[in-house]
Image (spheres, rainbow, N blue to C red):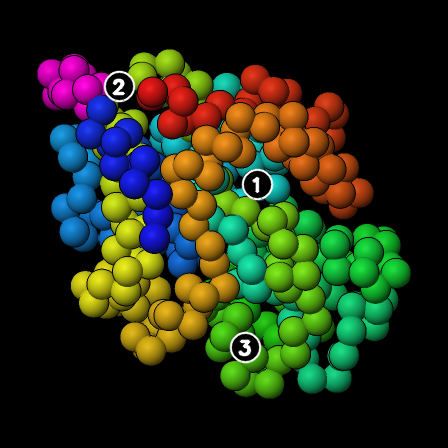
Amino acid sequence: MRPLTRRAFLSAPLALSTSACVRTRPPLVVATNRWIGYEPFYIARELNAYPGRAPHLVEFGSASEVVRALASGVIDAGALTLDEALQLMQHNPDIAVALVLDESFGADALVASGGLASAAELRGRRVGADSLALGAFMLGRALQHGGLAPSDVTLVHVSYEAQLKALDSGEVDALVTFEPVLGQLTARGARVLFDSSDIPGEVVDVLVVRQQALADRDGRLVSLLQGWFAGCDALLGSEPAALAAVAARQQIPPGEVKPALQRLRFPSLHENRHRFAEKATLLASMRRMHALLAGFGLVEGAPPSGRQIVSLPEVLA
């Protein structure tokens, strides 16, 4: 069960006091890629759970496209892994991490063809990833466990849609991948060398928002937040309509939805407030991740500042 404190927030006077203002503004444009952890946004749309002005949801083929759209200013907010957000924020100080959407506990993994049994055997191998930022982070942590360095492997881009073929054909020796492709690969004999359950709490997805949208403090953000948690409730409650919507959007059999979701955790509103209250801890985690990405040459310069961590629930309180 998710805390009832969220209900109190979602019925706060702010939602009513800003309703007239919302009608004069265009909807927030929020982008994601096709990751099962972002489904609550789309479930909320399916169930008409956004009050007032619903966001305009845009699904891109990859996280890289979400990053580019945010960098160019054509969208207001986006869902990214924290490492992807760090890569974006280094050149875009007007972007802030505003909400922790989900945590991966095995839903992201480094997998290899049958001949490789451990990360220590990856020396000299080619490793593919759809998102080079997430790929570098997962691979870097796996290499640390295996006693190797980033320079011992070659990280290459392999799009989400091409991953099954890339591993089957030998184009790459290993892949950093995620559900539902992860389940499809293991069903075909791929071996999991390392996954996010080995580093609990480190692989998280976040909502990043332009500072201007946060400064507006209007009902569009209230609607976005309410819809997200309503979608989470429907998904975690295994509502048939929600599970069917996920299966259709993810293009997987309905029976694969629940097993995939068991490898994810969706922090509540209360948990989000607690995490953002401990800003120093969150910032320290981001700086450690920044250092790891720097080892792959994916970020440069100074790590993010505390100004780029803004609690969406507190902004709207």
Frontmost residue, 291 versus 316:
316
**Mark 3 touches mark 2? (CB < 8 Å):** no
Residue 172, image x, y percentages: 68, 70
Q: Can you identify the residue that label 2 sits on? A: 218
Residue 249, image x, y percentages: 29, 62
Amino acid found under the numbered disc labelled 1: Leu
Indicate whether residue 163 is drawn in magenta: no
Q: Main secondary structure of the magenta part?
A: helix
| Numbered label attached to residue 170 | none
Q: Which of the 4 quarters of the picture holds residue 99?
A: top left
Q: Which of the 4 quarters of the picture holds residue 7?
A: top left
Which quadrant would the C terminus be assigned to in this image? top left
Pointer 1 or 3: first along the chain = 1
Residue 40 position (above or below residue 85): below
The residue at the point 49 percent across, 77 percent down is 184
Residue 72 position (above or below residue 235): above
Q: Can you identify the residue that label 1 sits on? A: 82
Residue 15, image x, y percentages: 19, 23
Indicate whether residue 19 is drawn in magenta: yes
Q: Which of the 4 quarters of the picture holds residue 281?
A: top right
Element assignment for label 1: helix
Q: Can you identify the residue that label 3 sits on? A: 185
The residue at the point 60 percent across, 85 percent down is 189
Pointer 3 or 2: first along the chain = 3
- Magenta stretch bounds: 13-23
Element assignment for label 2: loop
